[in-house]
Image (spheres, rainbow, N blue to C red):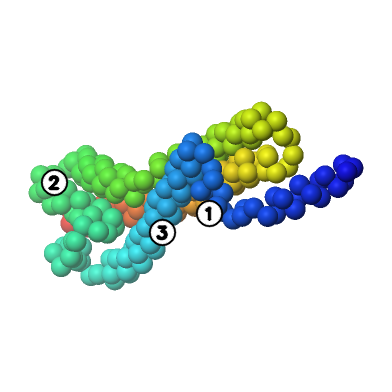
């Protein structure tokens, strides 16, 4: 039998095996099974975080649009503040309330221009502290996506190396270098590599996208703080005239 006939025969033998993904997992060694389960678990939690974050950001954008429309159409900040409903789930509302509360605490004590400047600084600082707290909450679990995106390829590579080691072990045990002997180990190795990439790519793309969306939302909050401070300054100046 020549070389070509041996390859054809080996290929037929390999095709006779069930090379489905489930069968590859069942036939894999304990270490490769652990790697596959670990990657699948990371993938599940990654997609959970991804869907949750996109859902939260979409709702927050809608609430921000609604809040800003009501804010700019209100006739009085005091009346708007007294009638606002704070459920603790809208960063714009939380930031606005922190600014108004600080204003009410300090405006009665302000008697000079220097005092007005100090009041505006305190209001802005208090509102930015609230922004930091809200953004920190939005960024929860993003570290998990970053960790998965950076480590999953290496976890998959570990499974790849282990599968190739199993192939060489099979060669040494059976004294057989045919495709039939090494195919299962190579297949499970490639499966671990592919799974590592399948877990990594969505995590990295989603992390970048979500981080970008959070930064834009934070910039929107920062712009609102500046606008609110300007309104407070004008009202204080008007009251002194």
Q: Name the quadrant containing residue 53.
A: bottom left
**Label 1, on which residue?**
22
**Label 2, on which residue?**
106
Q: Position of residue 63 (x, y in %)?
A: 32, 65
Task: Confirm or deny contact between disc 1 and disc 3 (CB under 8 A).
Answer: no
**Label 3, on which residue?**
51
Q: Secondary structure at mark 3?
A: helix
Closer to the N terminus: mark 2 or mark 3? Answer: 3
Judge whether residue 205 can be spotted in this image: no
Cα separation between marks 2 and 1: 67 Å
Name the residue: 10% across, 44% down.
109
Name the residue: 28% across, 69% down.
70
Q: Quadrant of the N terminus?
A: top right
Name the residue: 27% across, 45% down.
133
Closer to the N terminus: mark 1 or mark 3? Answer: 1
Task: Confirm or deny contact between disc 2 and disc 3 (CB under 8 A).
Answer: no
Q: Position of residue 96 (x, y in %)?
A: 24, 56
Residue that lies at the very extreme toward the right in this rendered image: 2
């Amino acid at each position: 039998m020549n070389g070509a006939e041996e390859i054809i025969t080996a290929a037929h033998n390999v095709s006779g095996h069930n090379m489905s993904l489930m069968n590859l997992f069942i036939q894999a060694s304990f270490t490769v099974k652990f790697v596959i389960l670990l990657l699948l678990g990371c993938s599940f939690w990654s997609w959970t975080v991804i869907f949750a974050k996109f859902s939260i950001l979409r709702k927050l954008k809608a609430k921000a649009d609604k809040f800003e429309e009501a804010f700019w159409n209100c006739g009085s900040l005091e009346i708007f503040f007294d009638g606002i409903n704070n459920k603790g789930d809208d960063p714009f509302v939380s930031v606005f309330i922190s600014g108004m509360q600080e204003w009410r605490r300090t405006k009665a004590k302000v008697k000079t221009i220097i005092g007005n400047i100090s009041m505006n600084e305190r209001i802005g600082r208090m509102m930015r502290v609230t922004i930091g707290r809200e953004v920190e909450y939005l960024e929860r679990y993003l570290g998990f996506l970053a960790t998965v995106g950076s480590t999953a390829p290496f976890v998959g590579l570990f499974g790849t190396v282990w599968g190739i080691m199993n192939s060489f072990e099979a060669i040494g045990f059976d004294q057989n270098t045919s495709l039939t002997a090494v195919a299962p180990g190579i297949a499970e190795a490639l499966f671990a590599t592919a799974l590592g990439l399948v877990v990594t790519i969505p995590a990295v793309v989603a992390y970048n996208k979500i981080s970008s969306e959070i930064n834009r939302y934070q910039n929107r909050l920062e712009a609102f703080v500046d606008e609110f401070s300007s309104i407070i300054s004008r009202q204080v100046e008007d009251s002194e005239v």
